[in-house]
Amino acid sequence: MIDEGFPTVLGVLVVLTLLAAPANAAETAAPEHAVERPALATPGNAAEAQAILGAKLLVCNTCHGDNGVPRSAATPIIWGLQENYLLKQLHDFQSGGRDNEVMLWMATALTDAELGSAAAYFSKKKWPAQSAAASSASPPAVVAVCQACHQQNLTGGLPAPRLAGQRYEYLVDAMRRYAEGERTNNPEMMNMMKALSPAEREAMARYISGL
């Protein structure tokens, strides 16, 4: 469990970080990326290391919400997503394999060990309850193909993350980015989305977000 009782100095640093960070974590391309140097604890000081990690994870709430519900509709829910998926995305953001100014800044603020801790922390959170409109009784035909990786009812598993109940705005934009080659960190998703029309992707996103 993350210790939220970190020192006052770290608390001030977090506030300054929040004020300096962009307000929206939607995936965006930018001409220049701000790479962060991770804050490190004194060697052997486990309490300080825990406090620093806790401060960094609080920054995630700026976009992803302190109750698991993102502040922007274009920002994905990360609470309860599969740990292996979260870790891969953090590595992809850190390496530039996935392009997002805010997440590059955040991922490079974490050490390699902290990347794993962050993924484990959010994966153990409960998927937030939402009041979403119910999906239609007849899902788009291509949704059946998605179940091969995203599992029955699209609740996710080891091969792929949960999609059911994810934000519509995020889903439809992520599908578009795969289709148009803006997001390249999953070749299979790129090929699948390229084979669909914008209308088909929109129908899928609408259905999945209502699950």
Image: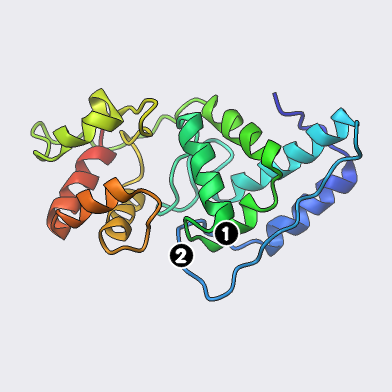
What residue did someone put label 2 on? 28
Q: Quadrant of the C terminus?
A: top left
What residue did someone put label 1 on? 102
Q: Residue at x 32, y 36 (%)?
A: 163
Residue placed most toward the observer, 37 or 80: 37
Q: Position of residue 31 (x, y in %)?
A: 53, 76
Q: Quadrant of the N terminus?
A: top right
Name the kind of residue labelled 2 in the image: Thr
Answer left or right for 35 relative to 163: right
Query: Image quarter for residue 35?
Result: bottom right
Farthest-out residue, bottom: 31
Residue placed most toward the observer, 104 or 135: 104
Query: Image quarter for residue 45?
Result: top right
Answer left or right for 133 relative to 88: left
Q: Position of residue 172 (x, y in %)?
A: 28, 53
The answer to whether residue 95 is seen in the rendering is yes
Up-down relation of residue 137 to residue 35 (above or below) = above
Name the kind of residue labelled 1 in the image: Val
Residue placed most toward the observer, 82 or 63: 82
Q: Residue at x 88, y 43 (%)?
A: 8
Q: Residue at x 69, y 38 (%)?
A: 114
Up-down relation of residue 55 to residue 107 (above or below) = above
Kindly indicate whether the residue at mark 1 contacts the one at mark 2 (C-beta within 8 angstroms).
Answer: yes
Circle 2 — which element?
A: loop
Q: Position of residue 21 (x, y in %)?
A: 65, 61
Circle 1 — which element?
A: helix
Answer left or right for 136 relative to 171: left
**Separation of residues labelled 2 and 1 (CA atoms):** 8 Å
Nearer the N terminus, badge 2 or badge 1? Answer: 2
